[in-house]
Image (cartoon, grey):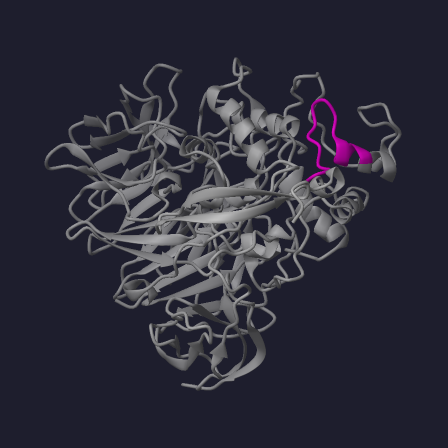
Amino acid sequence: MKKDKEVWRIVLLALGFGAFVLLVPLTHLSEAQSRAPQAANPAVPGDELQRSYQIDSYHLVSNNGAARGETLYFYKCWMCHNQYTIQAEYGNKAPFLHLKDLYKQTKLVTGQSVNDATITDQIKNGSAGMPSFTTDMSDADVADLVSYLKSGRCCVEGENPPANPWYRAETHPWSVPKSTSGGPRGKVRIPSGETPEGIMVQLIAPNGARTTVYAQEDGSFEFPTMQTGDYTLRIAKPLEYKPYHRDGVRIDGATRLPEIVLERIVRGEDLPAAKEVLSQLSGVEMLWNLQGSNFEKVAFNRSCGCHSYQQALRNRFDERTWRLILHRMMHYSGAPLINPEPGRNETTKDEEVLAKFLTRVRGPDSVDMPVRPFPRPHGAATRVVITEFELPRVLLSPHDVHGDSQGNIWYTSHKTQFMGKLDPGTGVVTEYKVPLIAGALPGTHRVWVDKNDIVWLSENWAHRLTRLDPKTGKFNQMVIEEARPINTPGFSNFAMAPDGTVFHTDRGPEGKGGTLTQYDPSSGSARVVKQWPLSKVTTTYDSTISADGNYWAGGSPAGNGNSIEMLDIRTGKMLELDTGAHESISARGGFDPSGNPWFGGRGGNLVMLDFKVGRLREYVAPLPYYPYNRYYEAMPDKNGEVWAGVNFGGSFVRLDPKTERWIEYVMPEPFSFDRRTWIDNSTNPVTVWYVDYNGYIVRIQPLQ
C-alpha cells in the first residue's frame, strides 16, 4: 500500500480479557466522506426485529416520512423545542422556540423566509445557538424531519404519543406463558467451532410478546409451555453472527424445533464498527471500546447518566455542536432540562474534558476501531427466562412499575400523560390518561399500589400526589407545596407506609439541610403530619419504608453524594452515614428482610446500611466494565438476595450478600435501563419486573 494512502498504527487495547495488539489501517478520507453520517454496511446485515436497531434507525413507527420524522424530532429536537421550555436567552441571545405551526410563520429567527430549503439548511448547518446536524443526519433523515414539521402534527408534547406497531395484544389475543419449561426445544450449532452457550433464542408470539431462553453448553435450549400456533423464531442480539429468524414456526407442546445454524459475519474476534453491530452493543460496551482514557470515560459516565449511552454515542458532531449540547445538558435543571439554573453559565472542568473527548471519538472525522463485545453468559447466568411485553405507545419514556393483588403490572410514563396496567397473562394493556395540569409538562414518576389496589402516582413536573381508583377510573391530583417552580424536578420518589401515609424529602436551600415530610392523603388532600430535618444533605434521591413501617431511609442527593439517611420513625432518631471519599451516589432502593436498606449506586456499586453495626457496606459486581456501570436501584427479595439493573450494561445482577455470589443475567436487548424494580415474592424462585426506559416491560424468571 502507498504510504500516502494508508497510515499504520499499533493500538494496544485492554478489554478486560487480556491485552492484545491490533494492527489497524486508518485510511485518509476525503472531507466529504469523513463528514457524511454513518451509513449502513451492506456486508453486515441489519436485524429489523432487534428493538435497538429500530431505535438507532428511528424506525419505531415507520421507515420513512412524517411518522419517522416524529421519532427523529423526539430524539433530536424536543429537548430544546417544546412548549414547556422557558424562552431563555442562550449565548447569542437566540431563544428556544416552540416549532408548532412553524410553516404558518413568515420568517425564521434568522430572518430567512420559512420554506423547505431554509428549514433544511437551518437543521443541517445550525446557527450560533443551535447545533449543526449535517454530520449526524442524512439527507433522508432531514427530509423526514421536515415532512413532520410541515405535517400539522408537530409537535410531540406527551399528549398523544404515537401508537406502537409491535403492540398487537388486543387485535391478536394470545396467552403468555407463566411456566419456565416444558415447551418447544431445539439446538444451536455453530459450524466454525465456538460454543453456543449463552446464545439467546427467542419466540415472538402473535400478540407481540417475546420469550427468550439461553442455549446451554451443548447448544440445547427449552422454552416454557406455549399456546399452540405460529410464532417467529429468531436469535436475539446475534452480534458476531448473521441475523437469524424464521416466520410461521408452528408450536404445539414440546415441539422439536429445526436446528439453528449460525454463521459468523467475520472470521476474527474483532467485529466491524458498523451501525448494525454497534446497535447491539450495550452502552458500556460502546464506551469500553472507544479510544480514550479512563478519566475521560468516567467523566462521561458521571455526567451523562439521565439517558442511555447509546443515545449520546450514536451521534457525530463537530466541537462547536458538542459544546452547545453539553452546555444545555449540564447547566439546565430537570430531566427534560427545561429551566435554566441561575449562576451556572461557567464552563466546568468536566464539560471541557467531555467536549474534547466526544469531538475526538464522536466527531465528523473520527474513525471507529473494530469492536469486541463482552463474553456471552454461561453457567447459572443462562438458567433464566426473559419475557418482553410491548406497550401500546412509543416515545413514552416509561419510568416505574408496581404490581397489584391481581397480578397486574402498573407502569408510569415520565414525559406523557399516559400510564397503564399490563395483564401478564395476555399482554393486554389498559391505558389511563392523567388529566393535564395547566402549564406543566405531563408525566408520572413513581407508582405505588396499596393493599386496596388503589394506585398512587407522583407527577414530577406538576408537583402532584395523584390517586387513581381503577374501578372508577377517577383521578385525584393533590398539590404538594414546594418552593421549586413548576417544570423542575419536584415531588417524585415518595414512599407509602403500611398506614397509608406518604413520605418524601423536600429540598432545602443550597448548603442547608432538607426536610423529610410525612403526608396524610386520606382526606383527599396532602396534609402534612410530621417533619424531620436532614442535617447533612439538602434532600435525598429516594424514600423507602421498612415492611413494619418503623423505619424510613433515603439515598444521596440527585447527581452526586455518598450518603444514606435512616430514620427511626417511632423515636425520631436520624442516622446519617457516608461512604467517605468514594461517591457511591446511592439512588433508589428498599429494605431487606433483616431491616437493612439497600440502594443502587450510580457510582458503580450496591450500598447497604448495616443497621446493627451502624455502617455502610459497598458491594461491587465482578463485571469487566466496573468503572462505567451505574445502578439506579437495588431491590432485595424475600430471601435477602438483591436485584439491580446495570443501567448501561444491558444486564441485571443478582447478589446473595451471605455468600457474595453474583449472577449477571444478560438481556435480549442491549438495554437494562431499570429505574424501578418490582419483585413478585409469591413465586418460587421470585419473579422480577422492570420497565425499560426505552419503552417495554420486562419479566425475569430465574430457574434456580
Asked whether residue 496 appears in the rendered view, the answer is: no
Identified at 44% across, 24% down, the residue is: 482
Q: Is residue 133 magenta?
A: yes
The C terminus lies in quadrant? bottom left
Identified at 40% across, 85% down, the residue is: 254
x and y percentages locating residue 173 in the rendered image: 55, 74
Q: Is residue 294 above or below residue 260?
A: above
Q: Is residue 513 above or below residue 502?
A: above
What main secondary structure does the magenta stretch of the protein show?
loop
Q: Is residue 473 magenta?
A: no
When asked about the image quadrant of residue 586, the answer is: top left
x and y percentages locating residue 153 in the rendered image: 75, 45
Q: Is residue 230 above or below residue 436?
A: below
When asked about the image quadrant of residue 407, the answer is: bottom left
x and y percentages locating residue 461 in the rendered image: 52, 33
Asked whether residue 682 appears in the rendered view, the answer is: yes
Instruction: Please identify the residue farthest to the left as the structure is shown.
Output: 613
Instruction: Please identify the residue farthest to the front as the structure is shown.
Output: 2
Q: Which residues are magenta?
A: 121-135
Identified at 61% across, 61% down, the residue is: 44
x and y percentages locating residue 156 in the rendered image: 67, 43
Left or right, residue 664 beside residue 260: left
Of 106 and 648, which appears nearest the observer?
648
Of 554 and 529, which appears nearest the observer?
554
Of 502 and 113, which appears nearest the observer?
113
Identified at 55% across, 71% down, the residue is: 244
Left or right, residue 13 beside residue 77: left
**What number of labels is visible?**
0
